[in-house]
Image (cartoon, rainbow, N blue to C red):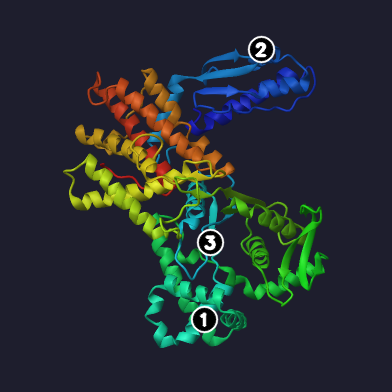
Amino acid sequence: MIGRMNIRDELEKRISAALTAAAAAVQPVPAIVSPAAKPEFGDYQANGVMAAAKAARMNPRALAAKVLEKLDLSDLAEKVEIAGPGFLNITLRTDLLARAATAAAADSRLGIAPAARPQRIVVDYSAPNLAKEMHVGHLRSTIIGDALVGVLEFLGHHIIRQNHVGDWGTQFGMLLAHLDELGEDAAGSELSDLEEFYRQAKKRFDEDPDFADKSRQFVVRLQSGDADCRRHWQKFIAVSLGHCQEVYARLNVRLMSADVRGESAYNADLPAVVEDLRRAGLLTESQGAQCVFLDEFKGEDDKPLPVIVQKSDGGYLYATTDLAAMRYRAGTLHVDRILYVMDHRQSLHLRQLFAVSLKAGFISPAVSLEHVAFGTMQGEDGRPFRTRAGGTVKLIELLDEAARRALEVVRAKSPEMPAEQADTIARVVGVGAVKYADLAMDRIGDYRFSFDKMLSLQGNTAPYMQYAYARIQSIFRKGAEEAAGLAGVPIMLNQPAERELAKRLGRLEEVLGSVAAECKPNVLTAYLYDLAGVFTTFYESCPVLKADSPEIRASRLRLCDLTARTIRLGLGLLGIEVVEQM
């Protein structure tokens, strides 16, 4: 018997064979079978006939008719029809869908097998500049990157999380200079609020040229290995990373201290990077700086744009560090794919980085280099998201506000709920709302942050999805049923709504594959939202606890459980928790 997750592959294999056979009399034609724009498990639409007919200069419907003559799907499909100009519409057998759903319900992974050929994938995300607390500018990279990590790991790939933090450079020179002037003892209490300590140092750097020069001298001392500078620097790093880990824990993301590999990790390799670029014949001196000029990157004056890897004073830049990181990931980590989850404004920088790395031989052309770009986060007025006073919004404060507002929603809906339980649900719902609102958007575009919209129980929001899960759990509580007691119960699809739900449930692997390939978490959120809507239709039209027979009752309960587990898994991969009751 064909397994649940192999049905689509089997369909494509058979249609490809039939298409090739039907077209062979005219000329050899590549067997192309592509899914519909929005394919659904059970309503499969093969578009490949159209492409093949165009290549063979045949009438698409005539070729489709020949394909049908060669195609035997009797064990898979109830009917196959030619539609439109030459599509093949395939309706899968209901008993096949029922067996597939039953198999998924019996499997801890919902029938989704790990990747046959797992890849080693670096995901570079979050990457805050240390010495100050994380703010909303770090939110999208952190959330999107972690969602991709969740999906890719579940699919069986070996994921190497890389938190390329800014732990080197001018900001630490400012902190060291400020510490030196205050004295270590006097600065001790102020270091408890590193954000304020940094603000003081930055103000002096901007206003006092002598202090700015002193800060730059401290950078040189730090990078040269001065023992005192390194000791104080490590203290700054420890305090700052502590703030980051607090945010990561609140956000329920998978980044740990072991995933931090900051700019400083590559410091010793920077001279070698420059020397290797010179040996490759890529370096050109321009105004005393060492640069790489590539013809494919030109400015408005039609002159090649420089990639500066060493300043005239001998210092290095972000590009140098990024090249060293690229070489480390390719040569030491031996990866197949690198995902850079960064603001779309970094597009030129990354395209130049990729091109230079390839030309220098730092990385093989076989490695997939991908910029997972995203737009900016705006306030409801369409302007950059800031505090009322115009300052930067700290992430911890944002999450506190989300939890506070979520608590108001929980109390309004369930005023009798114990305070401790309400606080727990508010934390889960608040953080989930912030994350889901971001992930539900096409990452390429800008989006407007709105607590009211993201905390709504209506529409494609985390609270709606979390409530959908909790509502299914309430069915089991009302019926005094345990999902574990349904093991072995076959799922029956006697009603159209049951069949429709099984079809949607069967799309999960396809959806996760799409997220993994396109790096778009909104494909998964759209699927979950659609699934919740189809479940509502099923629940309203197919009595569960009051079904006509014990067998139908058990079957529908198992469909309910499979739906809940699918929602829980999908949200979990996105880093969003569920609650049993709301």
Q: Secondary structure at mark 1?
A: helix
Judge whether 447 appears above or below 277 on screen. above
Q: Nearer the viewer, residue 278 or 156?
A: 278
The x, y position of residue 501, in whole percent, is 40, 26
Name the residue: 62% across, 51% down.
371
Q: Secondary structure at mark 2?
A: helix
Circle 1 Cα neighbour tier, 10 Å, few/some/many (<14 / 14–19 / ≥20):
many
Callout 1 amino acid: Leu
Q: Earlier in the sequence, mark 3 or mark 1?
A: 3
Q: Is residue 112 left or right of residue 121?
A: left
Q: Earlier in the sequence, mark 3 or mark 2?
A: 2
Name the residue: 81% across, 56% down.
303
Judge whether 532 appears above or below 327 on screen. above
**Where is mark 2, residue-wise?**
65
Q: Quadrant of the C terminus?
A: top left
Circle 3 Cα neighbour tier, 10 Å, few/some/many (<14 / 14–19 / ≥20):
many
Distance, label 3 to label 2, CA atoms, is: 56 Å
The x, y position of residue 313, in whole percent, is 72, 77
Q: Secondary structure at mark 3?
A: loop
**Where is mark 1, residue-wise?**
176
Callout 3 amino acid: Ala
Give the number of the disc on residue 127.
3
Q: Nearer the viewer, residue 52 or 377?
A: 377
Furthest-right residue in this view: 281
Q: Earlier in the sequence, mark 1 or mark 2?
A: 2
Distance, label 3 to label 1, CA atoms, is: 22 Å
Q: Nearer the viewer, residue 119 or 414?
A: 414
The x, y position of residue 242, in whole percent, is 41, 69
Regarding residue 284, the answer to whether it shows in the image is: yes
Name the residue: 27% across, 22% down.
543
Judge whether 469 appears above or below 365 on screen. above
The x, y position of residue 484, in whole percent, is 28, 38
